[in-house]
Amino acid sequence: MWRQLKRDIEVIFQRDPAARSLLEVILCYPGFHALLLHRIAHFFYCHGMTLLARFISQVNRFLTGIEIHPGAKLGEGVFIDHGMGVVIGETAEVGNNVTLYQGVTLGGTGKEKGKRHPTIGNNVVISAGAKVLGNINIGDNVKIGAGSVVLRDVPANCTVVGVPGKVVVRNGRKIADAEVSEIDLRHDELPDPVAEMLLCLQRQIQRLERRIEELEASKDEHLPVQYADGTKGRVHSV
């Protein structure tokens, strides 16, 4: 427990440049408070005291604006930045060194029983407002863009953007280093698949225009025409 608390404090200093002192982190960071209360609630939940665990989670929600079901499993080095509106479901599993921004939901998609929430790998960054729904697996070193809705499994070393979320290759560059200090938190630098598609369409139109110009330039100087009375003739270009 104390080792986890120490780790929770360390990652705040590593990932948030606004953190200036230990006292500030302990008193003013709702993400830290939420993790602390969740670990207490999870202890009681695992020992069969579910009502007490749920009560602690409700107090946690009231104090921090972060709702974590006591049954959720959170790894070490989890960082909830700001945190308002974060929701983590009962059967969700979050790996080590994961960063969650405000408004993130790790939720279910229906009333099914059993495992119904996502499993998040290590070194994952989930940006503000993103929704990861259902019993799906998010691989290690994945980045999920702000406002994305992810409904399918995502392999490791990928970036996901859009609604529904789509995997976008970032020029073959992988988020490969597992060190916490090297976790890529630049969730503002994400590719835009819609803009890329529009760019492809624009290039295709330009190719077609060039082809039309080539065809017009290669036409005969004398063009056949059809007159109104059905007779044919030729017109000479001036």
Image (cartoon, grey):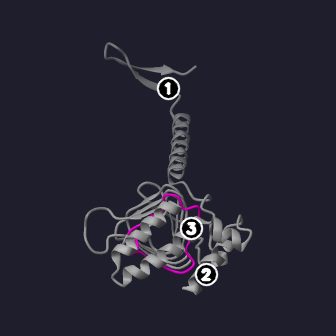
Q: Return the mark for residue 3.
A: none
Say what amino acid the circle numbered 1 marks.
His
In the displayed structure, 233 sits above or below 102; it is above
Q: Is 82 part of what is drawn in magenta?
A: yes
Say what amino acid the circle numbered 3 marks.
Gly
Query: Circle 3 — which element?
Result: helix
The alpha-carbon separation of the residues under discs 2 and 1 comes to 83 Å
Q: Which residue is mark 2?
A: 7
Query: Percent position (x, y) of residue 200?
Result: 52, 50
In the picture as drawn, the residue positioned furthest to the top comes out as: 229
Query: Circle 1 — which element?
Result: strand
Q: Which residue is mark 1?
A: 222
Q: Is 161 part of what is drawn in magenta?
A: no
User: Which region of the structure is painted magenta?
Assistant: 69-89
**Res. 238 image quadrant:** top right
Q: Nearer the viewer, mark 2 or mark 1?
A: 2
Query: Percent position (x, y) of residue 47?
Result: 36, 85
Which residue appears at 37% of the width and 83% of the height? 46
Q: In which quadrant is the N terminus drawn?
A: bottom right
Q: Which residue is mark 3?
A: 31
Asked if residue 1 shows in the view, the reply is: yes
